[in-house]
Image: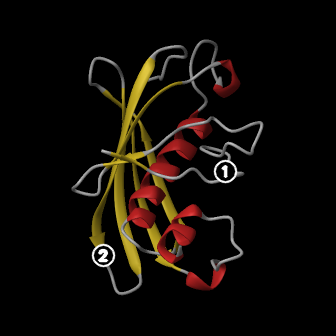
Amino acid sequence: MEALPEHGKCFVCGSQNPHSMGIRWYVNAAGEIHTKVTLTEAQQGPPGHAHGGATAAILDEAMGAAVWSAGHRVLSVNLNIDYKAPVPLDKEVEITARISGKGERSVHTTAELCLANGKVAVNGRGIYVEAPQFFNENTENPFWRAEHD
């Protein structure tokens, strides 16, 4: 697996954001995104458990990373999150995301957040639409820079 570049000020994975979750993403040969992370009180919702918005942000970022690492310059336009089980804090979880289909301008994705026992706690589906006009060499986007360096 190959580590993906982080996104400077990104809320989920940016090293330049003091409030970032600091997640590192990895892509395998099939283009699937993987990571393991332990959520903390900084992501708490119900006592001792992750906030649903935090897990949604993580899955959105994972699905977006799958699309971006495949070379598409997109923005998310639809995100569906299904909560199957509470996500405990201070326990490692695993996230996986992939492209599940493509349209004329859209890319469809799926993702899962699994507990240590392998149970899917949260899954997601996303639709991302090509939007290259939002990204250029001045954009803080390491995927764009990596292609043009």
Tell me if residue 92 comes above or below residue 16 in the rendering. above
> Which amino acid, mark 2?
Lys
Give whichever of 120, 4 is nearer the camera.
Answer: 4
Residue at the extreme left: 30
Q: Which mark is residue 102?
A: 2
Q: Where 121 sits versus 27, above or below?
A: above
Q: Tell me if residue 45 comes above or below residue 70 in the rendering.
A: above
Left/right placement of residue 41 relative to residue 103 reads right
- Distance from the alpha carbon under mark 1 to that under mark 2: 26 Å
Q: Which residue is mark 1?
A: 10
The colour scheme applied to this rendered structure is secondary structure
Identified at 47% across, 70% down, the residue is 128
Q: Is residue 136 visible?
A: yes
Q: Residue furthest front?
A: 149
Q: Residues within 10 Å of mark 2 (few under 14, many from 20)?
A: few
- Residue 74 pos. (x, y %): 51, 73
Residue 28 place in picture, x, y as percent: 27, 49
Q: Position of residue 41 (x, y in %)?
A: 67, 18
Q: Secondary structure at mark 1?
A: loop
Quarter-of-image position of residue 45: top right
Of 87 and 90, nearer the camera is 90
Which mark is first along the chain, 2 or 1? 1
Q: Please tell me whether mark 1 or mark 2 is closer to you in this view.
A: 1
- Report if residue 75 is visible in the image: no
Q: Quadrant of the N terminus?
A: top left
Residue at the far right: name it.
18
Q: Residue at x 50, y 40 (%)?
A: 24
Secondary structure under the numbered disc 2 in the rendered image:
strand
